[in-house]
Amino acid sequence: MVREDEQTVINKLVTWAEGKPDIRAVILTSSRAKPNATLDEFSDYDVIFVAEDIKPYLEDENWLDDYGKVLVVYRDPVHLEYGFERFTRVTYYRDYSRIDYTLWPAGLMKHVASMPRLPDYLDDGYKILLDKDNLAKGIKPPTYRAYIPKPPTSKEYLEIIDNFYNEVMYVAKSIRRDNIFAVKLNMDHWMKQAYLRTMLEWLMEIENGWKVKIGVYGKGLKNLTRPELWAELESTYCGADKDENWVALFKTINLFSRIAKEVGKGLGYDYPEELETRVLEYLQKVKSGELP
């Protein structure tokens, strides 16, 4: 199957909504609604359908097949937003399209249109594709500045460092226990994805005047980060071998320490050198078998 171009996909969605009496509006959000956004073949379509009643679409999902042959669906549970129920269906199709459908009741659309400030996911960019009842009247235009990180406070900076070194202790214990699930969870997810990535994003914002959007899960970090720094980050990932994971652990700590010190210097915060020294001394004892 051939993937359809963007305008064809959007036209199909709008045409479908026009033919459904209970669908009153369609809003395109996220990357495809932002000017100058970088898109590729994996960029999805984030679409809000505003319905008179969302329950029929929740109870019977055959409507997902109206676009094309479904490959797989992630069913996000019903959430309350400003007191209104809404839900999302992340849908992959066999033509390789991915459409994230969010169903709103009309009351939620009216409420958002009356708000003095847009929710971040709309302030990041949106386009009204269809509005049968003028429900969006008065809605604020997007500023496209949502999701640009703000400089952390000293407390937030130190909290990330404390959390990082707390995870270090779990990794050391799990390597000794030969528990690869825990090693990868604590080192690759918490240490790197949660804390090292955050610190690296702060460094990129410092270097770019707090004006760039990194993207979810560090999507844009590679293009912003100095090549030698990125190569060092990649070298911290390894397989299941215990010795390799010890090496990766110390590499990760060294990289985090250097980035955190740069961030601290850029923000005027002191890096807790003594904490790092204590943890490294402890790790050496765990690694050598001095400690149980």
Image: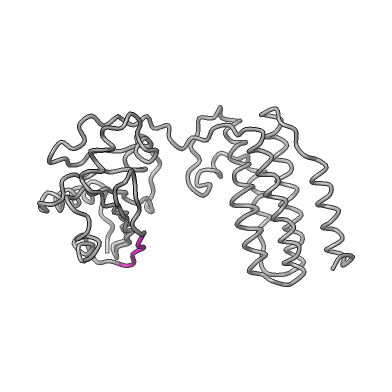
Viewer-proximal residue among 33 and 132: 132
Q: Residue at horizontal 18%, vertical 44%?
A: 25
The color scheme shown is: one colour
Can you say whether 5 is above or below 149 in the image?
below
Can you say whether 1 is above or below 54 in the image?
below
In the image, is residue 174 part of the stretch drawn in magenta? no
Q: Quadrant of residue 171?
A: bottom right
Viewer-proximal residue among 146 and 162: 162
Can you say whether 247 is above or below 229 in the image?
below
Q: Residue furthest front?
A: 83
Q: Residue at horizontal 17%, vertical 48%?
A: 14
Q: Is residue 184 left or right of residue 5?
A: right
Percent coordinates x, y for residue 250 in the rendering: 76, 54
Q: Residue furthest bottom?
A: 178
Q: Residue at horizontal 75%, vertical 65%?
A: 173
Q: Quadrant of residue 286?
A: bottom right
Percent coordinates x, y for residue 195 in the rendering: 63, 48
Q: The C terminus appears in which quarter of the rendering? A: bottom right
Q: Is residue 19 left or right of residue 200?
A: left
Q: Residue at horizontal 64%, vertical 47%?
A: 196
Q: Main secondary structure of the magenta part?
A: strand
Percent coordinates x, y for residue 258 in the rendering: 73, 41
User: Bounds of the magenta span?
Assistant: 71-76
In the image, is residue 74 part of the stretch drawn in magenta? yes
Q: The N terminus appears in which quarter of the rendering? A: bottom left
Total marks placed? 0
Q: Is residue 286 left or right of residue 85?
A: right
Percent coordinates x, y for residue 12 in the rendering: 18, 52
Viewer-proximal residue among 131 and 214: 131
